[in-house]
Amino acid sequence: MNGYTVNEQGLMNNFAVEPKMYVQEQSRTGFTQYAEKLNGRLAMLGFVSMLVMEALTGQGLISWLSNL
């Protein structure tokens, strides 16, 4: 790819380089492997966040929420 294109009139345009397009064959909705991995990672993040909050405040999640 040279970094320029030539239109039908023979004029050179070096700003009209278009990216290559692709179509993703796999769906990312429903019970797919991607969704299950994402759900697991978010659950691990939430669990670790809860442990860090408990270590910093000295209270568990239920007692912390009841003291709000």
Image: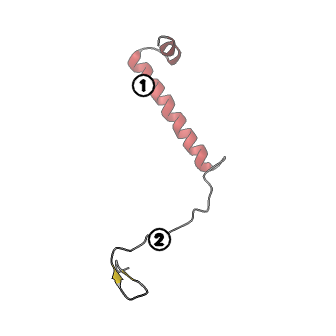
Q: CA distance from mark 1 to mark 2?
A: 44 Å
Residue at image location 47% in from the left, 13% down from the top: 68
The percent position of residue 33, horizontal first and vertical second, equals: 62, 49
How many circles with numbers are drawn on the protein? 2
Identity of the residue furthest to the top in this view: 67
Mark number, residue 14: none
Q: In the image shown, does 4 or 37 lie closer to the viewer? A: 4
Q: Is 42 located above or below residue 22 in the figure?
A: above
In the rendered image, which residue does mark 1 sit on? 52
Q: Secondary structure at mark 1?
A: helix
Q: Is residue 25 above or below residue 36?
A: below
* Residue farthest along the front direction in this orientation: 9
Q: Please, is residue 27 above or below residue 57 in the view? A: below
Q: Could you say which quadrant of the image residue 53 lies in?
A: top left
Residue at left 38%, top 89%? 10
Name the kind of residue labelled 2 in the image.
Answer: Lys
In the picture provided, is 10 more to the left or to the right than 37?
Answer: left
Residues tagged 1 and 2 counted as in contact (Cβ below 8 A): no
SS for tag 2?
loop
Coordinates of residue 45 in the picture (x, y in percent) = 48, 34
Q: Residue 50: x and y, percent?
A: 48, 25
Q: Quadrant of the N terminus?
A: bottom left
Q: Which residue is mark 2?
A: 20
- Return the disc, 1 or 2, that comes first in the chain's sequence: 2
Q: Which residue is painted at 57% across and 65% down in the image?
A: 23
User: Label 1: few (<14), some or many (≥20) within 10 Å?
Assistant: few
Q: Residue furthest right?
A: 31
Q: Amino acid at mark 1?
A: Val
Q: Residue at x 38, y 19 (%)?
A: 56
